[in-house]
Image (tube, helix red, strand yellow):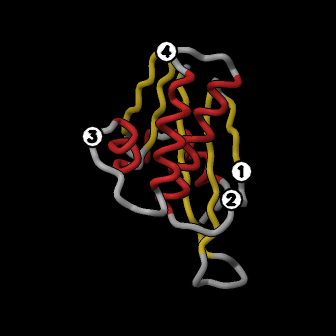
């Protein structure tokens, strides 16, 4: 099963100094979007999106999964190539390590933003 994931943080309309997170996952041509994931930064939103993608794949009974995202840091950390050092991101990394055990094969791939279907879906929510 192939799942595209993306997360982002946008300024809160009430308080511009705060950012509200939103996430998207695209699988089998369907976009799963969650708009108000609380306050946080882009990296936290990306981890939430990857974890949401894993939950969708697990609920679908997938055994061999490919997660595709455009956040190089999150992809490299998920692959174990880069160390996750941020105290705010470590719980997400730990949950990912535990959650991916639900699958027989896990692949994570980085693509440019223009090729990330979940990123495209998020961008459509906020036309310029």
Q: Nearer the viewer, residue 81 or 29?
A: 81
Disc with the residue nearer the chain's start (4 vs 3): 3
What residue lies at 58% left-to-right and 49% top-to-bottom?
Answer: 48
> In the displayed structure, does residue 10 sit left or right of residue 31?
left
Confirm or deny contact between disc 2 and disc 4 (CB under 8 A).
Answer: no
> Which residue was labeled with disc 2?
37
Q: Nearer the viewer, residue 114 or 82?
A: 82
Viewer-nearest of discs 3 and 2: 3
> Which residue was labeled with disc 1?
34
Viewer-nearest of discs 1 and 4: 4
Q: Position of residue 121 (x, y in %)?
A: 61, 46
Gap in angstroms between the C-alphas marked 3 and 1: 28 Å
Q: Secondary structure at mark 4?
A: loop
Gap in angstroms between the C-alphas marked 2 and 4: 29 Å
Check disc 3: other Cα within 10 Å, few if <14, some if 14-19, many if 20+.
Answer: few
Check disc 2: other Cα within 10 Å, few if <14, some if 14-19, many if 20+.
Answer: some
Disc with the residue nearer the chain's start (3 vs 1): 1
Disc with the residue nearer the chain's start (2 vs 4): 2
Confirm or deny contact between disc 4 and disc 3 (CB under 8 A).
Answer: no
Q: Position of residue 6 (x, y in %)?
A: 53, 47
Q: Secondary structure at mark 1?
A: strand
Q: Which mark is residue 81?
A: 3
Against 107, residue 10 (above or below) is: below
> Which residue was labeled with disc 4?
104
């Amino acid at each position: 099963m192939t799942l595209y994931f993306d997360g982002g943080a946008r300024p809160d309309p009430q308080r511009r100094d705060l950012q509200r997170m939103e996430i998207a996952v695209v699988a089998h041509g369907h976009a799963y979007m969650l708009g108000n994931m609380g306050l946080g930064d882009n990296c936290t939103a990306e981890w939430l999106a990857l974890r949401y993608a894993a939950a969708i794949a697990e609920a679908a009974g997938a055994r061999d999964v490919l997660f595709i995202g455009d956040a190089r840091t999150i992809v490299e950390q998920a692959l174990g190539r880069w160390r996750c050092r941020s105290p705010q991101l470590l719980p997400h990394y730990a949950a990912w390590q535990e959650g991916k055990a639900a699958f027989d094969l896990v692949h994570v791939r980085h693509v440019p933003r223009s090729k990330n279907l979940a990123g495209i879906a998020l961008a459509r929510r906020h036309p310029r």
